[in-house]
Amino acid sequence: MYLDYAENMALRRKPMTMQEWSDKLDAFLAFNEREVLTHAGKVSAQVAERLALERYTEFEVRRRDAERQAADAEDVAALERLEQQLDGAIVKKR
């Protein structure tokens, strides 16, 4: 929802400073009863980067598996079409 708001502001070409964006985000979080962080948080940059890399690696494995499965399904479909064409050609020759 916030990104929709930000996109709308950009489409309307309304100039805003970084401080205004920060204030709008804080107001958006407060309105949605979310905690507004007033500090750097509890996770160090190293830990955050490690977690991000781990999650990306998991995502990449799933993405590649899905890509392989889709390619395999396309191959099977192509082979089935060829088989039908060959069956049709054999029937016509008889």
Image: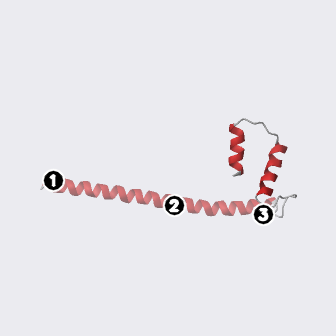
Q: Inspect the image, locate mark 3, and give the three-letter code of the amino acid beneath it.
A: Val
The answer to whether marks 2 and 1 mark residues whose Cβ atoms lie closer than 8 Å is: no
In the rendered view, tell whether residue 24 sits above or below residue 87. above
Q: Position of residue 76 (x, y in %)?
A: 37, 60
- Give the secondary structure at mark 2: helix
Residue on which disc 3 sits: 47
In the rendered view, tell whether residue 43 sits above or below residue 88. below
Q: Inspect the image, locate mark 1, and give the three-letter code of the amino acid beneath it.
A: Lys
In the rendered view, tell whether residue 11 sits above or below residue 91. above
Q: CA distance from mark 2 to mark 3?
A: 29 Å
Q: Report the label total.
A: 3
Visual colour scheme: secondary structure
Q: CA distance from mark 2 to mark 1?
A: 39 Å
Point out which mark residue 92 bears. Answer: 1
Is residue 60 shown left or right of residue 26?
A: left
Q: Inspect the image, locate mark 2, and give the three-letter code of the amino acid beneath it.
A: Ala
Q: Residue at x 54, y 59 (%)?
A: 64
Q: Position of residue 32 (x, y in %)?
A: 76, 58
Residue on which disc 2 sits: 66
Q: Earlier in the sequence, mark 1 or mark 3?
A: 3
Q: Earlier in the sequence, mark 2 or mark 1?
A: 2
Q: Residue at x 69, y 42 (%)?
A: 8
Q: Residue at x 71, y 46 (%)?
A: 5
The answer to whether marks 2 and 3 mark residues whose Cβ atoms lie closer than 8 Å is: no
Extreme residue toward the left, this view: 94
Q: Residue at x 24, y 55 (%)?
A: 86
Q: Earlier in the sequence, mark 2 or mark 3?
A: 3
Q: CA distance from mark 1 to mark 3?
A: 67 Å
Is residue 12 shown left or right of residue 35?
A: left
The answer to whether marks 1 and 3 mark residues whose Cβ atoms lie closer than 8 Å is: no
Name the foreground residue: 80 vs 36: 36
Point out which mark residue 63 bears. Answer: none
